[in-house]
Image (cartoon, helix red, strand yellow):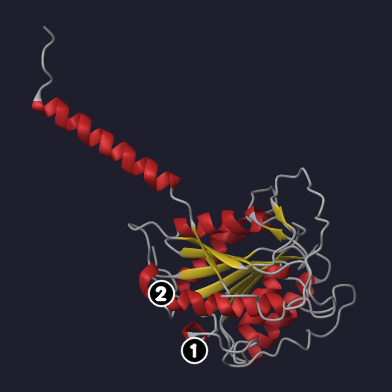
Amino acid sequence: MKPRPSTRALTLFVSSLAYLLALTTIMAAPNRELKLWPGVPPGDETFKAPTTKAEPKNDGTLRIAVVTEPTLTIFQAPAGRANGAAVIVCPGGGYNILAWDKEGTEIAEWLNRLGVTAAVLKYRVPRRDPKEPHVAPLRDGQRALRLVRQNAAAWGIDPARVGILGFSAGGHLAVMAGVAWEKSTYSKLDAADELSARPDFVLPIYPAYLGDEKKAGPLSPLLTITSKTPPMFIAVTHDDQLRGVNAALLYVELKKADVAAELHIFTRGGHGYGMRPSADPVSGWPKLAEGWLRAMKYIPAL
């Protein structure tokens, strides 16, 4: 006759099983994806998506070539680490594709480690208007900021600490969200659109299209900086065409308007590195950005 297990052993077994089941559930739980618009996105009423898609590249980056239904993918900060801040992440890709993992989901995971809830924005690509490629993405960005604030209580977010971060074209989108927030780019649809579309802080990383990228000149006329422009942290490299020059011009205008800002121009690093490590010092930008977020009190000091 086999001995019966002790009550203590049975209790430990049940507790361990329950823990494993809970852990499996947490690991398997997908990040929430929220549609931005209740119907056809404004401005896309006559848009026809291209039937040919961009050729995939075997370079370790997941690219999204066509977006007709913009969304936010919510990466909730861990309960024991969440500090109430939130950041909308805008991947880059020339307003033609989205570098979804390198400049999106990987950034969300880093923000989660800082206790920040991240919302990766799948904005509309490819370009709807070749001359003004930012128009449809900016509508998506403004709507995203309002939806995050509408869901602030449910997601444990402080609506006064909602920022936006972007890379390349996504960096341009982040800057546009910071300078054009006073004028809505679409007609009100619902209660969310009664909320502010002003980001509380902006982090453009190797932002594109701030000015002419082949000939040094003035800042883009789209970028009107005022005292109400949100604080910015900017990181770029000297060897990235004229994007370092244009970032410096942006910084000058922020300084003139007395807007708190921090600019890092690294000698080498090129473009499109996300936060993947390399031998170049530009790989240290995430640590510098974290320091700025803490110094500005968007996230707690260590």
Q: Which residue is mark 1?
A: 194
Mark 1 residue crowding within 10 angstroms, few (<14) / some (14–19) / many (20+): few
User: Which mark is nearer the camera, 2 or 1?
Assistant: 1
Height in image: 141 above or below 272?
Answer: below
Amino acid type at circle 2 is Ala
Question: Horizontally, is 88 left or right of 216 in the view?
Answer: left
Number of numbered discs on residues: 2
Amino acid type at circle 1 is Glu
Height in image: 255 above or below 173?
Answer: below
Q: Which quadrant: the N terminus?
A: top left
The front one of 264 and 19 is: 19
The front one of 25 and 106 is: 25
| Residue 161 in view in this figure | no
The front one of 244 and 92 is: 92
**Tag 1 secondary structure:** helix
| Residue 81 in view in this figure | yes
Question: Horizontally, is 143 left or right of 63 in the view?
Answer: left
The front one of 78 and 43 is: 43
**Tag 2 secondary structure:** helix
Q: Quadrant of residue 269?
A: bottom right
Q: Which residue is mark 2?
A: 152
Residue 212 x %, y %:
85, 78
* Label 2 vs 1, first from the N-terminus: 2
Height in image: 147 above or below 98?
Answer: below
Q: Residue at x 16, y 27 (%)?
A: 10
